[in-house]
Amino acid sequence: MTILAAEADFHPETLWDESPPASPDSPEVRWCCLHTKPRQEKAVARELRQAGLSFYLPQILHESHTPQGRAIRSLIPLFPGYVFLKGDQNDRVTANRRNRLVGVLEVFDQEALRQDLQRIHAMLRSGLPLAAEPHVQPGMCVRIKSGPLAGIEGLVVRRGGGDHFVAIVRFLSRGTSVQLQDWQVEPISQRGTSREAFTC
């Protein structure tokens, strides 16, 4: 089985650390969503890394086969056509120097996007088998109680094979899912911010 080399999915290593508040005199650093031209996500991510810019390109394992039947496993973008950039206006200009973008999408709820991306990152790093969720349906909000994803909150969506836990990026209405048993999750109270945060 051939395994294609993986591209770095985020930069820098401290991307998920809590950042101190920006100085009032410094350029405003915000998350935005780079809408790329088809099949340009990894090239954009590679150029952002070379330029020392902060980004996140969530990727998921995909298996395909050659005409001869040989299996090929590779990492593909979880959200085709999108790369998340954390930077200022100058960084956005730098990101578009190679003309690989369709446009830059503004993100107005910065904290919501940061939380969503951290949940996606934790799920992708868990080692559990995941599936892309192109269209997320509303469901019960739960918190995972045990295992490598303990503490992560998200939605439960009914699938043919059972219930799946879904972490979404609300900005894109897309996400990733993993199958869990009832004993592994607990409902989140409708009171407080957790319930409201997911807009179930």
Image: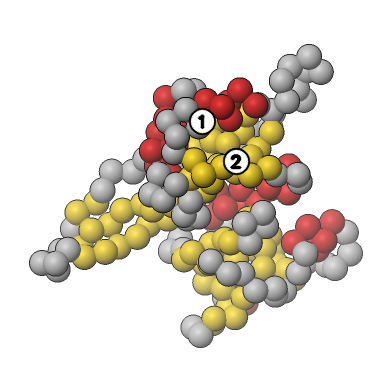
Residue at (45% x, 34% y) in the render: 99
**Mark 1 = which residue?**
95
Tag 1: Cα neighbours inside 10 Å, few (<14), some, or many (≥20)? many
Seen from the viewer's position, the closer of residues 95 and 166 is 95
Seen from the viewer's position, the closer of residues 144 and 132 is 132
**Mark 2 = which residue?**
104
Residue at (61% x, 48% y) in the render: 117
Q: Is residue 163 above or below residue 108?
A: below
Seen from the viewer's position, the closer of residues 176 and 187 is 176
In the rendered view of the protein, which quadrant contains the C terminus? Answer: bottom right
In contact (CB < 8 Å): disc 2 and disc 1: yes
In space, the residues marked 2 and 1 are separated at their CA atoms by 10 Å
The secondary element bearing badge 2 is classed as strand
Of the image marks 2 and 1, the number of the one nearer the N terminus? 1
In the rendered view of the protein, which quadrant contains the N terminus? Answer: bottom left
The amino acid type found where label 1 is placed reads Ala
- Colour mode? secondary structure
Residue at (51% x, 30% y) in the render: 95
